[in-house]
Image (cartoon, coloured by chain):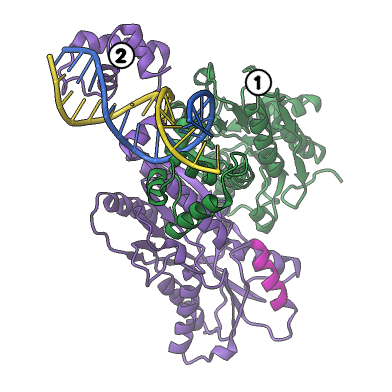
Chain colours: A purple, B green, C blue, D yellow
Amino acid sequence: MTLKDIAQELNISVSTVSRVLNGQDKKYRISAKTAKRVIELVSKHGFTRNQVARNLRMQKTDTIGLVIPDISNPFFSNLARILEEELRKHHKMILLCDTLENSALEKESIDLLIGRKVDGILVSSVGLKSAHLHNIDIPMVLIDRYYPDLDMPYISTDNFKGSYLATNYLLKRGHKKIACLQGLKHTVSNSERIRGFLQALRDFDISEHEVQILGDEFSIASGYNAAKEILTSSDHPSVLFTLGNQIALGALQAITESGYKIPDDFSLISFDEQPYFQLMNPPVSTISQPVENIAREAVNMLIRSMKGEEVSSRLIAPKLIERSSVNSFIT
Amino acid sequence: MTLKDIAQELNISVSTVSRVLNGQDKKYRISAKTAKRVIELVSKHGFTRNQVARNLRMQKTDTIGLVIPDISNPFFSNLARILEEELRKHHKMILLCDTLENSALEKESIDLLIGRKVDGILVSSVGLKSAHLHNIDIPMVLIDRYYPDLDMPYISTDNFKGSYLATNYLLKRGHKKIACLQGLKHTVSNSERIRGFLQALRDFDISEHEVQILGDEFSIASGYNAAKEILTSSDHPSVLFTLGNQIALGALQAITESGYKIPDDFSLISFDEQPYFQLMNPPVSTISQPVENIAREAVNMLIRSMKGEEVSSRLIAPKLIERSSVNSFIT
DNA sequence: GTGAAAGCGCTAACAA
DNA sequence: TTGTTAGCGCTTTCAC
């Protein structure tokens, strides 16, 4: 069923139908009677107008591309949930692209979104390179994973600060040998967290040589493997600092399997709070990211950017949640 | 940039450009030279053809609507991840609709998807009523949440069986007073789980009056509140059976806060395995849903349904994962 | 107060 | 081997 069908059935023109359906009957001074006839027929038949045709004509789609590395990671699924909610307020739908932390897929996804003429793109870039983000003339906001030197607005946790906070906390409690279990190298989230980690060490006059940095993915498997390696090495650190919630899960699994106890044998602190951390044995101290703020602000920025306004990037400070997974050597 | 621009620049017709871009140059015997000129220009300018126009002309969009109650629930985000991966193999993208467990939003979402002319819809229905799913002439597969008496293919966990399995396990270990913490009433997942629970009781000659059923959402908050109510009541059950992963998280939180120990004070078993359950104190026994199978099969069914093939519904049996959160009174 | 018609960018039937 | 053209369903300018 199309506007044309309705027009024919009522013996009026498609333009009139279109106008009524767009609530422009006042504006075009269409008689209340005609408007009523249209409305009634439409609701009787349950007609929904063809958005594809409309999008083509209007040169906009009311669709936003969401490009994220892994929707099954609770950090991103929480983000997605709020983004969706906020975007709906602006009558926009989300085209979802999960890039599986793969740069090639990310590039491909963005090309697909451009072809589909989305009105804007929210992307949490895998992050190794940003070439595919240049010269895109669709409003775009980087979220969580950004490129500091790319001229494109971003909104993210202040990963440096968060990591500094965590490391400083460890150092103040007398930890000197720290093993840092990182995520995907060369992503900003990871390198900023590493940077914060190293800066805190430096401020405490601890040499980088006393710490270890292991792992290569924001995944359970990577956390598990890295932790296993640590546990079987002769030179034990006193604490593990995991740079993501999934990494922590993997590390905890390895520790549990090996029969070690937290915090007696190893302390643990993790980036990226999740509800289950407080229920672990013992409850795990974490750095909590302002997911809700990030999501709302991202939509805000994108919408403004779509209106042609200038928007400036922002980093939001995370918080330390102290629980009982970190031992203290200071009396 | 459009096909027309390219055509003009090369002094050929749009149809030739279109044909080359669709890889139909052989079919239409377009000279290798012409084809090459097109390809070169296109790659030089980084042209992506307008899918909106193409979709209108082709009467299909290569887009699938995904309608789920809560993308932030790990069960659904895991599902979404695999669905996305599978659909990409068929060159389909996902339009995401999170209904926030709200029937009105679900109806609205489906209408929007119909307007956008998606090629198919995957829906995990909130479930209270199914009226809005009647008379939809787009291929549709129900996933996880279905309507048994609606003539629409579905794929889901066998919730009855899973719940029976869990309850039977409890009963065999001597539990008689069970508190069941349910999710959203009138959703199939919930009512089937309740049915399995009650059936197991009946098979053990235990009266329904000896058990409690509390809660009303698949959320942390609902689990927390229900558990609080149980903990403060005079008539303690020996075990909590939570019907969803989020409910379990809430219940565990309440138990921990109240200072009770699992399984000494209360036993606990939960529907819907997640990685963190094995890391709890103590590790929580669960019913594990075959998420990956469900996702792959859903896509399979939808694709076949889009080809006009008949597809039949299926329930997949879940598994019991025994850990140490359930006490035994049998010696 | 309403209608005719152009055109969004593409594909494909038909023509040459 | 390539071009012309109709038309997908809608919005909107211009005309009456």
Which three-letter amino acid code belongs to the residue tagged 2?
Ile
**Segment colored magenta:** A220-230
Q: Which residue is mark 2?
A: A39
- In the visual, does A6 lie left or right of B18? left
Residue visible at 60% across and 45% down in the picture: B88
Local SS, label 2: helix
Kindly tell me whether residue A166 is visible in this rendering. Answer: no
Q: Few, some or many C-alpha atoms within 10 Å of disc 2 (few <14, some 14-19, many ≥20)?
A: some
Q: Nearer the viewer, residue D11 or A21?
A: D11
Q: Quadrant of the N terminus of chain A?
A: top left
Magenta stretch: includes residue B266: no
Whether residue A210 is situated above or below residue A46 in the rendered picture: below
* Location of residue A145 with respect to B51 vertically, above or below: below
Question: Which chain does the numbered disc 2 sit on?
Answer: A
Q: Residue at x 36, y 16 (%)?
A: A4
A227 part of magenta stretch: yes
Q: CA distance from mark 2 to mark 1?
A: 35 Å
Which type of secondary structure does the marked residue at label 1 adopt? Answer: loop
Mark 1 belongs to chain: B
Comparing A68 with B99, the one in front is: A68
Residue at image mark 1 = B148
Contact? badges 2 and 1 (CB < 8 Å): no
Identify the image quadrant of residue B46: bottom left
Q: Is residue B207 above or below residue B291?
A: above
Which residue is nearer to you in this view: A68 or B52? B52
* Majority SS type along the magenta span: helix
